[in-house]
Amino acid sequence: MTTTVAAPADGGGDQVFLIPNATFFVELAIFLAILYVIWRYVIPPVKKAMNDRQEMIRGQIEESERTRQRLQEAETRYQQALAEARVEAAKIREAARADAAVIKDEMRQQAEQEVARIQQRGEEQLATQREQVVRELRAELGRLSVTLAGRIVGESLTEDARRAGTVDRFLAELEGMSATEAATVVPGGAPGGVRSGQRNR
């Protein structure tokens, strides 16, 4: 509390002065003590909490920025990998087409070679069969000629020299007849190329 003191003043007026007493100083001391307690024990934790909160927010912002950068880098790598994969796939397709063309050409060449081998083998077999048939026909013709000549001529063909001469003569006669009378056929279906004189030998 304060004490009011009236002091005389020149000019006839009274002036009032407030003089602090002991209560004022006590209240002032208590107020300063409260301020000290607040400054010493309340403000530091609050300030520390605010600083921690700010640091946490700053860390979250930095982490989100790093995450965004990593996401962009991952997207860039993905696009690069996708482009490389497309290029590689195109190369693989081109290589596959080239290989397919090569394989197709090789298979066509092999087929042509196989066809040529088959044709050659068939021609060889036909030639062999033709030669065999010719040999068989010649042998059969020789036997028939000998038999027919023996019946017509009536000669004995037991000896090799006489048989060879008879066959040659008969074949020569057949060639002569084929040149002159091969188209002539007697009534009854018998060929007219054999002379009546030869039948009576």
Image (cartoon, rainbow, N blue to C red):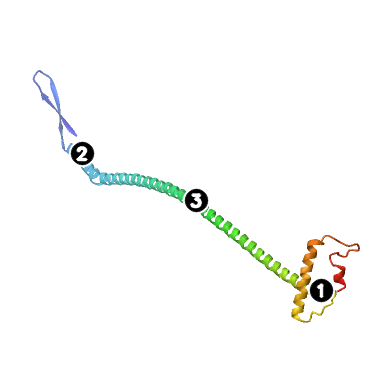
Q: Name the foreground residue: 201 vs 164.
A: 201
Dividing the picture into quarters, in which one does residue 104 lie? bottom right
Where 33 sits versus 12, above or below?
A: below
SS under mark 3: helix
Tag 3: residue type?
A: Glu
Q: Nearer the viewer, mark 1 or mark 3?
A: 1
Look at mark 1 in the image and give the residue it sits on.
149
Q: Nearer the viewer, mark 1 or mark 2?
A: 1
Tag 1: residue type?
A: Ala
Outermost residue toward the left? 10
Tag 2: residue type?
A: Glu
Q: Residue at x 48, y 49 (%)?
A: 90
In the picture, the disc for residue 94 is 3
Look at mark 2 in the image and give the residue it sits on.
27
Q: CA distance from mark 2 to mark 3?
A: 97 Å
SS under mark 1: helix
Q: CA distance from mark 1 to mark 3?
A: 80 Å
